[in-house]
Amino acid sequence: MSTLFQFKQFGIIHEKSAMKIGTDSLLLGCFVEIDGAKNILDIGTGTGILAIMMAQKSNAKIDAVEIDLSAFEEATANAKKTKWSSKIKVHHTAIQQFQSAIKYDLIISNPPFYEEENNIKINNAQRSKARHTTELSLNELASEVKSRLSDEGKFWVILPPNEADEFVLIASKLGLLMYREIFIKPKPSKSINRIVMCFGKQKSKSFGEVFTIYDESGRSSEEYYELTREFLLWKSR
């Protein structure tokens, strides 16, 4: 029996992919601003959720890159079942080997972010590959984004705070400049545990904001409802 996560306009099977549907991808996909992008690149697509969310939000052509064979097969199947299948192409390759002459208007990634030496290795080879930076370091991610992003393009990513700080330093050395920073808190009283960031090659005023998922009682916040209501099957509030 397949594990199906049902959205308003599509469903995602997340049975084979190491990384299941989670809040990180959902938040990133909802926050991304399309800005008329015609070509989008999703690095490490997993189940294909971000690529499919971009297809719902835009008229762009989307390349989704995935190194893991099982995840690639699942992402391909998920994309084919949507009404936007003609817009999405899933590629089974590492981003470092992905061949494309396109300069992308928009690049997105929910990347692996744990350094193995600083974390207990997950006892599952596929899930460990998806969670750790052995296959794609933050340096490599920034370098690939720099070379594949158009001059006016934007790159959106979600990371934990420590890794976010590291990535900002790496990106700035390559000329990728911060445009927007969204600090995610599970509850008002909790610490920030994720940061959604937007980068570009042009100088611009950057701004930050705090976003809270739940209130103190554990009920979804009004801002989370408003952000996700075009995608999630919400019951009446």
Image (spheres, rainbow, N blue to C red):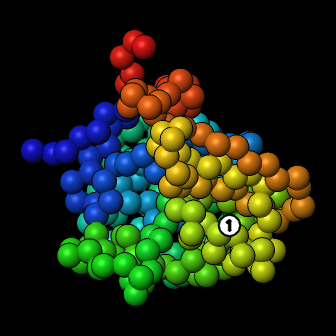
**Residue 214 horizontal/vertical position (percent):** 45, 33
Residue 197 or 192: which is nearer the viewer? 192
**Residue 130 horizontal/vertical position (percent):** 36, 70
Residue 99 or 207: which is nearer the viewer? 207
Residue 191 or 30: which is nearer the viewer? 191
The outermost residue toward the bottom is 117
Q: Is residue 232 left or right of residue 180?
A: left
Which quadrant is home to the N terminus?
A: top left
Residue 3 or 169: which is nearer the viewer? 169
Q: Check disc 1: other Cα within 10 Å, few if <14, some if 14-19, many if 20+.
A: few
Name the quadrant containing residue 40. bottom right
**Residue 12 horizontal/vertical position (percent):** 32, 43
**Residue 237 horizontal/vertical position (percent):** 42, 14
Is 183 drawn above or below residue 226 in the view shown? below
Counting labels gives 1
Question: Which residue type does callout 1 highlight?
Answer: Ile
Q: Is residue 88 visible?
A: no
Q: Is residue 66 left or right of residue 146?
A: left
Name the quadrant containing residue 46. bottom left
Query: Residue at coordinates 77% horizontally, 61% vertically from top-left?
Result: 178
Name the quadrant containing residue 69. bottom left
The outermost residue toward the front is 189
* Residue linked to disc 1: 102
Q: Is residue 13 visible?
A: yes
Tag 1, which secondary structure? loop
Is 176 drawn above or below residue 5 in the view shown? below
